[in-house]
Image (tube, rainbow, N blue to C red):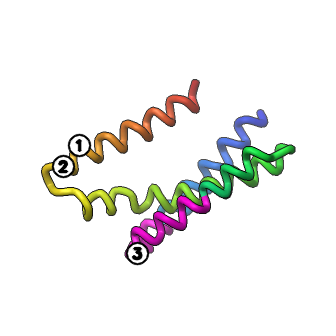
Amino acid sequence: MNKSIRIVAAYMIILCTFLILFGKAGDGKIKIFRIGIAIFITGSFLAGFSNSLFMLIFARIIQALGDSMTMSVNFGIIVEIFSLKERAKVIGFVSSIASLGTLCILD
């Protein structure tokens, strides 16, 4: 298996696994979101300083854990914060940014 595929696969497996778990536990949305951001930043820092494939995959797993926390509650936070009139615009913006990130991966 190609090394880059392992990195992406590890990220996606962890993200999809924990997305459902944190979505179910989303009662404290803001708290879960903040912890997720902190974990994602820690994973990003580790990925930036990784010096081996194993370390990079480990850092990406940490990033995916944090990302699953933020992704699972972000629409719930949007619904709580924005009025009915603004929601569609904000959800469209957030979805567009996520899609652009996916396009960068595929390039």
User: Identity of the amino acid at label 1?
Assistant: Lys
Locate residue 87 relative to residue 36 in the image: left or right: left
User: Identity of the amino acid at label 3?
Assistant: Gly
Marks 2 and 1 close (CB-CB < 8 Å): yes
Q: Is residue 23 magenta?
A: yes
User: Residue, x 29% and y 47% (percent of image)?
Assistant: 91
User: Residue, x 57% and y 28% (percent of image)?
Assistant: 106
Residue 42 drawn above or below residue 23: above
Q: Which SS class for mark 3?
A: helix
* The quarter of the displayed image where residue 38 is located: bottom right
* First reached walking from the N terminus: tag 2 or tag 3: 3
* First reached walking from the N terminus: tag 1 or tag 3: 3
Q: Position of residue 20 (x, y in %)?
A: 47, 63
Q: Position of residue 107 (x, y in %)?
A: 58, 24
Q: Which mark is residue 102?
A: none
Q: Which SS class for mark 1?
A: helix
User: Identity of the amino acid at label 2?
Assistant: Glu
Locate residue 35 relative to residue 61 in the image: left or right: left
Chain part drawn in magenta: 21-39
Q: Using the image as rendered, state which of residue 28 and residue 3 is in the foreground.
A: 28
The residue pinned by badge 3 equals 28
Q: Using the image as rendered, state which of residue 88 and residue 12 is in the foreground.
A: 88
Question: Chief secondary structure of the magenta span?
Answer: helix
The residue pinned by badge 1 equals 89
Residue closest to the far right: 52
Q: Using the image as rendered, state which of residue 19 and residue 27 is in the foreground.
A: 27
The residue pinned by badge 2 equals 86
Q: Position of residue 41 (x, y in %)?
A: 62, 55
